[in-house]
Image: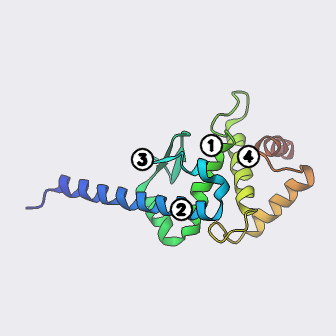
Amino acid sequence: MINAVHDAQERALRAQQICEDILKNTRNQLYLNMRFLDNALAQLYPAGDMEMVPAGSDGDLFYYQPEKLMAMFKRSREQVNRLYLHTLFHCIFCHIYPDDKVDQEYWNLACDIAVESLIDGIHKPCVHLPMSPVRAEFYGRLRKKIKVLNAESIYHTMQEMER
């Protein structure tokens, strides 16, 4: 007779091992293409978390939802590389520590836009995905108002656009 609990534990352990292999491969690809990130890439340790969609970080751990990460990897290695790099850049730029006075929703969006625009500017096959026309047009609108697309500038510009 098959023990359902034991079977579920075995599947979860196997998924965790697969995800750790995926993330090790991701870090290696990013390191080989962007050696300047050597120390930063070594700082986040993988941690499975069923609540994450698909991933996040507290600055020490890279939390991932195993099924989502495996599905993303099946679709595109570049997406996983971008996800890891996206999360790493949030840590590097201290986006995980927002000022208490900011509108949290705008701040999170501004941080995501800043990080994605940076990744879109990295011309390496390991992170390259075609940019949508909507994204390109929005970057263009932002660049007409600000020189450097950092989170703070984007945050204030988006608030002005909303008025």
Q: Residue furthest right?
A: 144
Helix or strand or loop: what does disc 4 sit on?
Answer: helix
Asked if 89 appears above or below 125 in the picture, the reply is above
Residue pointed to by mark 4: 110
Q: Label 2, label 3: how many angstroms apart (C-alpha)?
A: 22 Å
Tell which circle, 1 or 2, labels the residue nearer the N-terminal end: 2
The residue beneath circle 1 is 91
At label 3, counting other C-alpha atoms closer than 10 Å, the crowd grade (few under 14, some 14-19, many 20 or more) is some
What kind of element bears circle 2?
Answer: helix
- Nearest to the eye among marks 1 and 2: give it: 2
Residue flagged by tag 1: what amino acid is it?
Answer: Cys
Q: What residue type is labelled 4?
A: Ala
Q: Name the residue under label 2.
A: 28
Tag 3–tag 4 contact (CB < 8 Å) = no
Amino acid type at image mark 3: Asp
Q: Nearer the viewer, mark 2 or mark 3?
A: 2
